[in-house]
Amino acid sequence: MNDQWIDVCAVGEINEEDVIRFDHGPYTYAIYRSADNEFFATAGLCTHESIHLADGLVMDHVIECPKHNGRFDYRTGKALGAPVCVNLKTYPVRVDAGRVLLAISV
Amino acid sequence: MSQDNTASTRDYRLTGPEAARAAERGLVSASWYQSPISRQRMKQLMQRRDGPALLDTAIWLLALLITGFGGYWFWGTWACVPFFLAYGVLYATASNPRWHETGHGTAFKTRWMNDALYQVASFMCMFEPHVWRWSHARHHTDTIVVGRDPEIVEPRPPSLFMMLLSLFQIPLLLKTMGGVCRHAVGKMDAQEQTFIPESEWSKVFLAARIWLVIYAVVFGAALYLHSWLPLMYIGLPILYGGWLSYLFGLTQHVGLAEDVLDHRSNCRTIYMNRVLRFLYMNMNYHLEHHMYPMVPYHALAQLHEEIRHDCPPPYANIGEAFKEIIPTLLKQRKDPSYFVRRPVGSSRPATDAHPQAEATLS
Ligand code: FES
């Protein structure tokens, strides 16, 4: 399997300490910009009940799910306690010429 | 009005035929209506703070201390009665919304503060911490969906006798103590197994054992001192101070529609005075809380202002809500399909297509 870099958006399209939803083919991802201007990506749906994390709240390095407030560390995907028990998948992200790029396996 | 798609008496168990029926009808883990609000504004409303809950908690603990001390000081005379009445409401009623808000993780910004108060408040309102964390998640997923929601306060047709017992929280006390004993010996019942993942069971069992030790110490102290006094502080408050919690619980959804995917049809928002809002931690904005559970209690009034144009009119006070609830309950005794239809405008689907998440890793 090889990583393929896909263009997500311009850097400025994600606010600091925020998240956006990014759909590609049949899949959905959550793309984060931290308060210290780093970018991260995880699977887009909560592992508890498949709710879009992009509607949630980013606090420090945590994304809180909008449905039952389950929390993940979006840098590692680690589930931080009930009701989320299964970690999120994470994906490599890089910034190139002002664009946010996401690596997915093909 | 009557809901013609319901049988006259329904099976509210999570393990009965209604669970499968709810799934067939697309009511399980479904998309719910949300009043439109910009992401920018929602981000502001979702912001967490420690200050409001620190102040609220300090006032609450101080009030418990003062009323508890008054009860002790006047113990053996009639003068202790008002102190214990106030202590009981602060202990057994005000702990419930604190359990609730910290369970959502929205009371404080600092996580350990939420977790610590969650454990204390769960014990005080007799909600087993891990059981109710999971049951409440289900309540938010499938709010008042019969066969799915474990937190339907009054199944139809309502029993006036059970309601009378509930004013003294007797059903809750019996159910909780039964659950605590069962969990302390490492057993889960069939209904709990439908909403608590097996990986969490050990936490349920540990909490139950800790609770039993605490109750044993309090009982032991009462026996040793030949006095009811220790039980007046821990154990009995649920019986003499939980009545307001039950009344608050009735106002949230009772008498409204079952099996709908719009919180405007099955939740009440009621204006309340400052004292009630303090005790209830603003859960009188119940519709707002269900529609956007990420918004902390101290921002619910602002959220209400943002979406009220899209919601049914709020009730002017708790009395107005009960003017609707009591006759509805009486009618439902004869016609369980009867419910109050809230005036709700046109709905749009909450979300669009449902792409898959990439596979998740544990
Ligand atoms: S759906 Fe995300 S915490 Fe439940």
Image: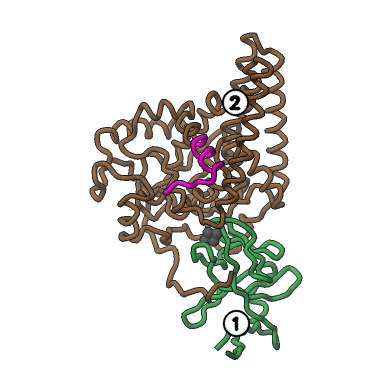
Chain colours: A green, B brown
Residue B259, x across and y down, in percent: 35, 51
Left or right, A28 with respect to B6, comes to right
The numbered mark at residue A8 is 1
Left or right, A23 with respect to B73, comes to left
Is residue B41 visible in the rendered image? The answer is no
- The subunit carrying tag 2 is B
Residue depicted at 72% across the width and 30% down the height: B62
- What range is drawn magenta here? B176-190
Q: Is residue A7 above or below residue B337?
A: below
Q: Quick one: SS at disc 2?
A: helix
Residue B195, x across and y down, in percent: 47, 53
> Label 2 is placed on what type of residue?
Gly
Q: Residues within 10 Å of mark 1 (few under 14, many from 20)?
A: some
> Label 1 is placed on what type of residue?
Val
- The subunit carrying tag 1 is A
Residue depicted at 56% across the width and 54% down the height: B200
| Residue sitting nearer the eye, B303 or B179 | B179
Residue depicted at 44% across the width and 29% down the height: B166
Query: Quadrant location of the C terminus of chain B?
Result: bottom right
Is residue B142 visible in the rendered image? The answer is yes
